[in-house]
Image (cartoon, helix red, strand yellow):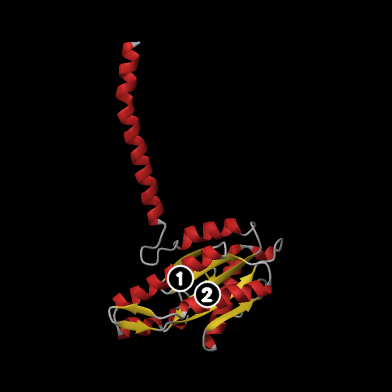
Amino acid sequence: MSQTLTALAAAVPVAAGWSLHSLMLRRRIETARHDPLSGLWTREPFEEHARKTLGVCPRAVMVLDLDGFKQINDTYSHAVGDAVIAATGRRLARWSTFYRGVAGRLGGDEFAASICCYNLRGLHQAMDDLAEQLRAPVEFEGHVLWVGFSAGVVCARQGSRAAALPRLMRCADEVMYGAKQTGGGWRAGADNATPAYRTVNGRRDGRRGTDSEAEATG
């Protein structure tokens, strides 16, 4: 019996050590899945979470770009641009959580979100709330910036073939581009609309992740 107790006592620190190691490893993996600047999910984990939510309740999927972000970097500094990205991330996180959703940074000044939305009136309320939050000034080291945005949002029809996340994001991106071309703000579109622009690597030609040199137009 004493030998058994001795063996168990010796095993406790080892088990505790492995448990702590596993916890730290999980935390590192989880941290790596978050964008360090905005605090939001990166593209792959965002899509994982957004895909799981599509069957939970009627969803709206949004793709968003900041307007004039390159000019902010060029005029002020990349540090100021980073502050804008960080502020946008915090605002999107609060907004998406309030509307039972998830948000992510897809890259650069491009973001996406999926929120719970039961009807058109609710969609307008949610997007107007987002616009109000994003249009608040960003203050950083003496600079006060008002940053515009362009967003496209589509509602997923439950049970529809068009409700697959890649198609929803592709449609939202197309709508966002239309909003950007006409002065920014947000615009809603249909989840089964036929894209007007060529699709490259699953994305609108010219967006990040395609081989087109027209990326700057996004």
Asked if residue 111 shows in the view, the reply is yes
State the quadrant of the N terminus. top left
Give the percent coordinates (x, y) of residue 140: 31, 77
- Whether tag 2 and tag 1 are in contact, CB under 8 A, the answer is yes
Q: Which mark is residue 91?
A: 1
Dot label at residue 114: none
| Helix, strand or loop for disc 1 | helix
In which image quadrant can residue 158 be found? Answer: bottom right
* x then y, percent, for residue 70: 37, 82
Looking at numbered disc 2 in the image, what kind of residue is underneath it?
Leu
Residue, far top: 1
Residue sitting at x 59%, y 63%? 165
Which residue lies under the disc numbered 2?
A: 130
Which residue lies at the image location 29% right of the left edge and 80% below the top edge? 77
| Residue type (three-letter) at the residue carrying disc 1 | Arg
> Residue 96, how many percent across, how many down?
52, 66
